[in-house]
Each structure stands twice: as structure tokens, then as C-alpha cells.
Amino acid sequence: MKLKLDLHTHCWEATRYAPPSLDIARRIVNQIKEKGLDGIAITEHHSSKYSYTMKELIAQVAPEVIIIPGQEIDGPWKEQVVELFLPDGATFRFWAHPFRLDYTDLNYHIRGPVQGIEIDNPMHTWHLDRPAIRAYAEKHNLLLLSDSDAHYVEDIGRFHNEIDLAELSRLGRNGNGLKSQDV
Ligand SMILES: [Zn+2]
């Protein structure tokens, strides 16, 4: 079943690092519903702890809303990779807002293979070379993703994907996609 999901949001930053609470959960849920989404991934920088806490709180106020815990991590070249921890235990990784695609000469590597790449991210529109990203994704068999990268609550859901969670799990599990030796 295809779901409408924004897979890259910074809910903690968006609420000015307020401690997780049911009030915050309600604010986030309201925005998700206003945008007509089935859910979001919560992907703070360098830690997934907040996302798991918020997932529990959101489940109390709106159990029908899908929350995927995750985090955004830095690679050695400051490239950023989002990790999504899926309900069945698989991890799906995607390259967020790629700022350059020719890492071949840079000994580029990331923590694990990525299976997706962002082609839309309103925080980074100024440098996203969409035709090049599209060609790159095709070459390396990466899923193209459109996410908000929201740093304000009202930005959650500015972009979203229509995606089957089972498909993300399948891609994450078989690890296909871009690995360091491929670039
Ligand atoms: Zn981000």
C-alpha cells in the first residue's frame, strides 16, 4: 500500500528543542493531518533518541499516524545521509540534498550503502542539480525522494513521497544501491 510520507524532518529543531511532550506531539500531528500525509520520518542530526520518544507520544494522541524513527548523519566529506529504522527492523538509507555527485576522486564512502537520493528538498533547492541527480539515481539504481527537511513545524509535509513501506524494507534489506566501491 502506497503511503504519503515526508521522510526527512527535524521536529526537535522545529519546536526549538522543546522537550518531547503530548502537546508537541499534537502540534506535529495537526501539521501532518493538515498536509494530508499518512506520516513522517523524524530525523534529527546524529541521534535517533528523540524520534523514538516522539513516536511513542504521537502513538498516544494519534495511533493512526505513521512515525518512522531515524537520524541524519554526516559522512567524511560532510555529505549527509538519512537513516530510517523501519518497523520490521530493516534500515533504509538515503543521501540527503546531494551537493556534488562526482565523489570518485574523493575516496568517498559512507557508513553503509544508500538506496535512495533526494531530488527535492526546499532547504537546498539552490544547489540541487535535478537532471544530474535523476541521471545519477538511474545509473546507481537509487530511489528518488522528495522531502521537506523541515526545520519549522509549518514546513513539515512541504514535500512528500508516495511509497510502500514494504518496498523501502525490501530495498534496505538487500542493501542494493550505491556503495563506496561503486562511485
Ligand atoms: Zn536535514
Image (tube, helix red, strand yellow):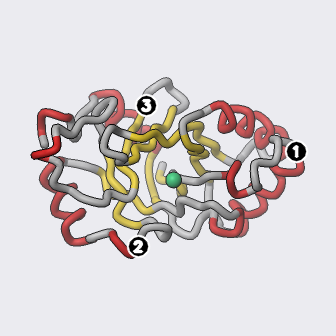
Residue 123 place in picture, x, y as percent: 49, 67
Question: Which type of secondary structure does the marked residue at label 1 adopt?
Answer: helix
Q: Are marks 3 and 2 in contact (CB under 8 Å)?
A: no
Residues 158 and 150: in front is 150
Quarter placement of the C terminus: top left
Q: Taking 14 as reference, is 41 left or right? A: left
The mark nearer the N terminus, 1 or 3, is 1
> What is the CA distance from the residue labelled 3 to the residue labelled 2?
26 Å
Question: Which type of secondary structure does the marked residue at label 3 adopt?
Answer: strand
Q: Taking 106 as reference, is 172 left or right? A: right
- The residue at 38%/59% (across/down) is 97
Q: Taking 115 as reference, is 49 left or right? A: right
Query: Does the closest atom of ligand 1 sit within 8 Å of the Cβ of label 1?
Result: no
Residues 38 and 85: in front is 85
Query: Does the closest atom of ligand 1 sit within 8 Å of the Cβ of label 2?
Result: no
Residue 22 is tagged as 1
The mark nearer the N terminus, 3 or 2, is 3
Q: Alpha-carbon neighbours of circle 3 within 10 Å: few (<14), some, or many (≥20)? A: many
Give the labeled residue for mark 2: 125
Residue 52 place in picture, x, y as percent: 67, 32
Identify the amino acid type marked 3: Thr
Q: Are marks 2 and 1 in contact (CB under 8 Å)?
A: no
Identify the amino acid type marked 1: Leu
Q: Which numbered disc, 2 or 1, marks the residue closer to the eye?
A: 2
Q: Which numbered disc, 3 or 2, marks the residue closer to the eye?
A: 2
Q: Could you tell me if residue 131 is visible in this image?
A: yes
